[in-house]
Amino acid sequence: MSSDIDLRVPDLVALEEIELYAEVLSAVAIADRPLTTDELDEVLGLRRRAGADRC
């Protein structure tokens, strides 16, 4: 492998997408079944958990 390869990600949008993908992969890795759409949305921060607003 060449030592002059720059592995930094200069594109912030691409970096955020990589981080989201990593979150999904982590959730899938610990699940014992396929995740539902709602569960994927939760992992991605698109939906709050039921009861999250309650104190």
Image: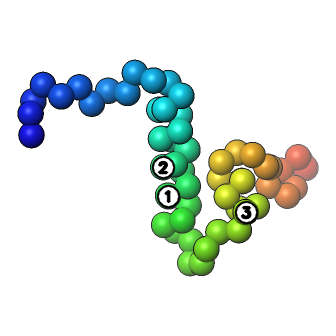
**Residue at which label 1 appears:** 25
Within-10-Å neighbours for mark 1: few <14, some 14–19, many 20+ = few
Residue lying at 45% horizontally and 23% vertically, measured from the top left: 11
Precedes in sequence: disc 1 or disc 3 = 1
Q: Which mark is residue 22?
A: 2
Given the image, on which type of amino acid does mark 3 rest? Thr
- Report helix, strand or loop for mark 3: helix
Precedes in sequence: disc 2 or disc 3 = 2
Position above or below: 19 against 14? below
| Marks 1 and 3 close (CB-CB < 8 Å) | no
Residue lying at 53% horizontally and 34% vertically, measured from the top left: 16
- Report helix, strand or loop for mark 1: helix
- Report helix, strand or loop for mark 2: helix
In front here: 39 or 9? 9
Left or right: where 3 falls relative to 35: left
Query: Disc 1 and disc 3: Cα gap in Å?
Result: 14 Å
Q: Which mark is residue 37?
A: 3
Single out the residue that lies furthest toward the top: 10
Residue lying at 48% horizontally and 66% vertically, measured from the top left: 29
| Marks 1 and 2 close (CB-CB < 8 Å) | yes
Single out the residue that lies furthest toward the right: 54
Within-10-Å neighbours for mark 3: few <14, some 14–19, many 20+ = few
